[in-house]
Image: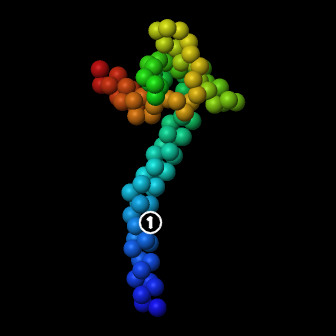
Amino acid sequence: MGEGISSVLPFILMFVVVYFFMIAPQMKRQKKEKKFASELKRGDRVITKSGMHGKVVDLNDKDNTCVIETLAGKIKFERSSISMEMSSALNKTEVTK
């Protein structure tokens, strides 16, 4: 009986370590990104994950998209393609100027 528990214990310990260092932080980040995308509003300055800079001019809740105005014109993007980290960094630098 004692050998069975001691042989399974390393696997349980590995799972716990993987959960706390990989799975839990990823779930937390996904929740933050979902909240960020749902809180977007017109006039927000954003950067997409592909590097496009622009300002949100229209939001569509039906298909979860937004229209971003750039120097080249207006482009329609999925809300999930907007970078949370880059957009929040952009907005912080504008506030300090």
Farthest right residue in view:
62
Please say whether residue 80 is visible from this viewpoint: yes
What percent of the width, then of the height, locates residue 7?
42, 80
Residues 97 and 73: in front is 73
Is residue 81 depicted above or below 22 in this figure? above
Is residue 33 depicted above or below 81 in this figure? below
Q: Residue at x 51, y 46 (%)?
A: 31
Farthest left residue in view:
97
- Number of residues whose C-alpha sits closer than 10 Å to that of mark 1, classed few (under 14), some (14–19) or many (20 or more): few
Tag 1 secondary structure: helix
Residues 2 and 78: in front is 2
What percent of the width, then of the height, locates residue 90?
37, 25
In the rendered image, which quarter contains the C terminus? top left
What percent of the width, then of the height, locates residue 60?
65, 26
Name which residue type carries label 1.
Answer: Phe
For disc 1, the marked residue is: 15
On screen, residue 43 versus residue 90, left or right, reads right
What percent of the width, then of the height, locates residue 79?
56, 30
Residues 90 and 24: in front is 24
Q: Residue at x 44, y 66 (%)?
A: 15
Please say whether residue 57 is visible from this viewpoint: no
Q: Residue at x 44, y 72 (%)?
A: 12
Q: Residue at x 46, y 28 (%)?
A: 49
